[in-house]
Image: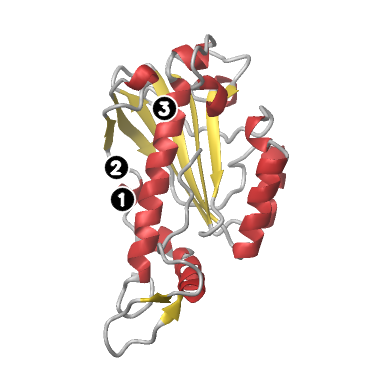
Amino acid sequence: MLGLGLLGGAAAGEWINHEPGTPQLTAAEQSARTFGLSRGLWHSTPVNTFFPATLHSAAAGPGGAARTWTRVGVAPAGNCADAFDPLLAKVLAPAGCVRLLRATYTDATSSSVTTVGLLVTSTDAAGMRKLSARWSSQHLDSRADLIPRSVAFAGTPAAGFGDKQRASWTVGIATDLPVIVYAVSGFADGRAVPVPQPVSAATAKGATTAPGQSGLGNDALALANSLDTRARAAAESLTVTPSGAPR
């Protein structure tokens, strides 16, 4: 489960602290301001902030093992055309697509590859809550016909990372920000995976499937959570800009 909690930390109805002489905002007003400003984070934040050249976790691998990933490529920022399988595109369509950012990583042994994506939506907070509720109530997170597409990069370990190579995935729909974060992983040798697994199954204790035993579920979950954390930090930085405008 991605860390999609509320920003701000104030209870509903409390006042948000500001510098002397600036208007005070209620928690609800601050939340609405954060949501609106966050739609501009894709052009206000350096690409390396979202997708660092190297990422490391001391305990993200199977059994709490250390894991290191290296970025092999960043896709040009664009719209969502052809970025998702038709059915997933249809499910996500109500959220709209302001911009889609994607990058692909490989692990330290170059045996696995993972594409992570940040979709900035055009809908309002109510629209995000509605999409999130549908995603959860209909258990869409476990459907193998709703896996995000990977991004391959020629001349890298991800050169053969296509639709048939997708092995494990996760999709997180925020309700307090206009963003959807996802990740999809596979084997770097280009082998097809007949039965992909969502991270909830691939990271379950005792998983015996190829995605589970190889740590592909762990890769997808860790990289998605890492991107989610950085996107939230970027969104929060926009809300504290003195001018109140995206930087």
How many C-alpha atoms fall within 10 Å of the one at disc 3: few (<14), some, or many (≥20)?
A: many
Residues 60 and 97: in front is 60
Q: Is residue 103 visible?
A: no
Picture mark count: 3
Residues 41 and 201: in front is 201
Query: Circle 1 — which element?
Result: helix
Picture coordinates of residue 95 (x, y %)?
64, 56
Label 2, on which residue? Answer: 52
User: Dots 1 and 2: beta carbons under 8 Å?
Assistant: yes
User: Dots 3 and 2: beta carbons under 8 Å?
Assistant: no
As shown in the figure, which amino acid type bears the numbered disc 2? Pro
Query: Circle 3 — which element?
Result: helix
How many C-alpha atoms fall within 10 Å of the one at disc 1: few (<14), some, or many (≥20)?
A: few
As shown in the figure, which amino acid type bears the numbered disc 1? Thr
Label 3, on which residue? Answer: 219
Residue that appears at 37% across and 31% down: 105
Of circles 3 and 2, the one toward us is 3
Picture colour scheme: secondary structure
Residue that appears at 33% across and 64% down: 237
Q: Is residue 28 visible?
A: yes
| Cα–Cα gap, marks 1 and 3 | 19 Å
Residue that appears at 30% across and 78% down: 242
Is residue 188 positioned above or below 3 on the image?
above
Label 1, on which residue? Answer: 49
Picture coordinates of residue 173 (x, y %)?
56, 48
Q: Quadrant of the C terminus?
A: bottom left
| Cα–Cα gap, marks 1 and 2 | 6 Å
Picture coordinates of residue 232 (x, y %)?
40, 55
